[in-house]
Amino acid sequence: MGEVGMGWRLLAMALLVAGATACTASNGETPSRDERRSDAFVRGRVLADGEPVSGVRVSVRLEKPGSPDGRRHADYLDDGGYDASARTGDDGTYVVEVDPRDLADELFTDERSVTYGLGLTARGRSMGWGGTAWLVGDDRTWRTDPLADGDDRVLEVDIDVVRGRVRVTSSSGDTETHGLAWVGAAPAP
């Protein structure tokens, strides 16, 4: 198993979250069910020592349960894997969307969950985080808790590329901060 593949596997095992909270619209009102429905899989910010970083590609990688780690990108796509990405805006924010209708049934466990790897490359180095997401409710929305419903929030992952820190906020609103190791060359001074 390659170093990068092992890193994804270790990171995927690290995220355990649960609970439930309601989301609110930007005007402070609770949005209607239709306004909450989206294909947002993960959202967050990419920062450099607390300042927003624009133009960073953030990707989500999904593979079949039990797939070997460390495979080349083309190999896992040929085997039915899935890849989605988004670039950060001027304010460093991103939203990666995954439409569940686009996914092969083989990507899901019996509990309708998927294991994901979230990755980005900035300043010539790569960083990643991973975990499990479930399709919940009749709306088929992505959440980090199998008992959540469509009213709960989507996973948020904020990454500071200079500090090597990730702040993860679950569907329940619980927040944890972790240190991450970079893969690749040392940062330029």
Image (cartoon, rainbow, N blue to C red):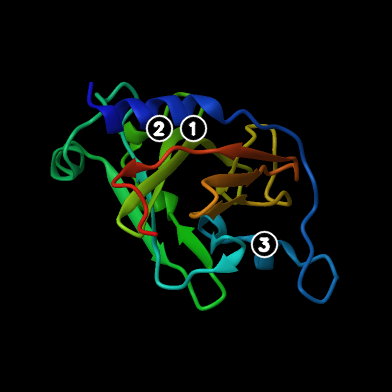
Seen at 80% across and 46% down, the residue is: 21
At mark 3, the secondary structure is helix
Q: How far apart are marks 2 and 3 (CA)?
A: 23 Å
Q: How far apart are marks 1 and 2 (CA)?
A: 5 Å
The residue carrying mark 1 is: 112
Q: x%, y% of residue 69? A: 26, 27
In the rendered structure, which amino acid carries the disc numbered 3?
Arg
> Residue lying farthest front?
189
Q: Residue 134 lies in what quarter of the image?
A: top right
Q: Are marks 2 and 3 in contact (CB under 8 Å)?
A: no
> Residue lying farthest right?
29
In primary-sequence order, the first of circles 2 and 3 is: 3
The numbered mark at residue 108 is 2
At mark 1, the secondary structure is loop
In the rendered structure, which amino acid carries the disc numbered 2?
Phe
Q: Distance between the residues labelled 1 and 3?
A: 20 Å
Badge 1: how crowded within 10 Å, few (<14), some, or many (20+)?
Answer: some
The numbered mark at residue 36 is 3
* Image quadrant occupied by the N terminus: top left
Badge 2: how crowded within 10 Å, few (<14), some, or many (20+)?
Answer: some
Seen at 40% across and 40% down, the residue is: 117
Number of callouts in the render? 3
Q: Are marks 1 and 3 in contact (CB under 8 Å)?
A: no
Determine whether, in the image, residue 23 is placed left or right of residue 142: right
At mark 2, the secondary structure is loop
Q: Do the residues labelled 1 and 2 touch (CB within 8 Å)?
A: yes
In the rendered structure, which amino acid carries the disc numbered 1?
Arg
Q: Which of 131 and 105 is in front in this view?
A: 131
**Vertical placement of residue 181 versus 29, above or below:** above
Q: Residue 62 lies in what quarter of the image?
A: top left
**Vertical placement of residue 155 versus 39, above or below:** above
Seen at 43% across and 54% down, the residue is: 98
